[in-house]
Image (cartoon, rainbow, N blue to C red):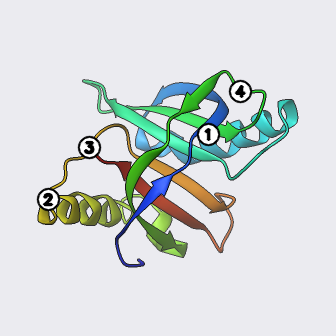
Amino acid sequence: MDDVRLRTGEAVRYASRSKQLGAAAIDAYVQESITALRREFAAAGDPFTQYHGCSKADEQIVEVCLPTDDGDNELPEQQLICTVVRGHECDYPEILAAYDALAAHAKEIGRELDGPPRETYLVDPGNRTAQMEVAFPLL
């Protein structure tokens, strides 16, 4: 895992697909959704996933997003706390270490997490050389 850092996330318009899923089904859904979104829209950046919390059945609400000028959704410019993970660090449950590191660092610097975490796929998921940025918006 790279060092934790702060950066400004640019405003981005995007199209997305969402579904409530258990951990075992997330990777396949993300890969399938990125492929489907790329068939429908011209990409204007790296795909990303936002996680909108857990249900009582311990399932995530997973929103797979593709930056595109034709998208119906928009993220505002915002301050992010982030790190980059690679290879097996991208796998569940290993990726939880990145989430824990971000939350701990935010607390150390007196900042609060403000919104759903996101994973931006710097290399398409499912690839042996997986690489992604894990980030949280900050207050």
Residue 48, position in %: x, y?
58, 47
In the image, what residue occupies the spot 25% across and 46% down? 113
Secondary structure beneath dot 1 equals: strand
Q: Which residue is mark 2?
A: 107
Q: Nearer the viewer, mark 3 or mark 4?
A: 3
Q: Is 42 above or below relative to 79?
A: above
In the image, what residue occupies the spot 79% across and 43% down? 43
Secondary structure beneath dot 3 equals: loop
Asked if labels 3 and 2 touch by Cβ distance under 8 angstroms, the answer is: no
Mark 4 Cα-neighbour bin, 10 Å: few <14, some 14–19, many ≥20? some
Ranked by sequence position, the earlier of labels 1 and 4 is 1
| In the image: residue 41, left or right of residue 102 | right
Q: Nearer the viewer, mark 1 or mark 4?
A: 1
Q: For the residues marked 1 and 2, what is the alpha-carbon distance in whole angstroms?
A: 27 Å
Q: Which residue is mark 3?
A: 139
Mark 1 Cα-neighbour bin, 10 Å: few <14, some 14–19, many ≥20? some
Residue 44, position in %: x, y?
77, 45
Ranked by sequence position, the earlier of labels 1 and 3 is 1
Q: Which residue is mark 1?
A: 12
In the image, what residue occupies the spot 33% across and 37% down? 115
Q: Which mark is drawn over residue 71?
A: 4
Secondary structure beneath dot 2 equals: helix
- Of the pair 23 and 36, the residue shown nearer to us: 36
Residue 14, position in %: x, y?
66, 33
Ranked by sequence position, the earlier of labels 1 and 2 is 1
**Quarter holding the C terminus?**
top left
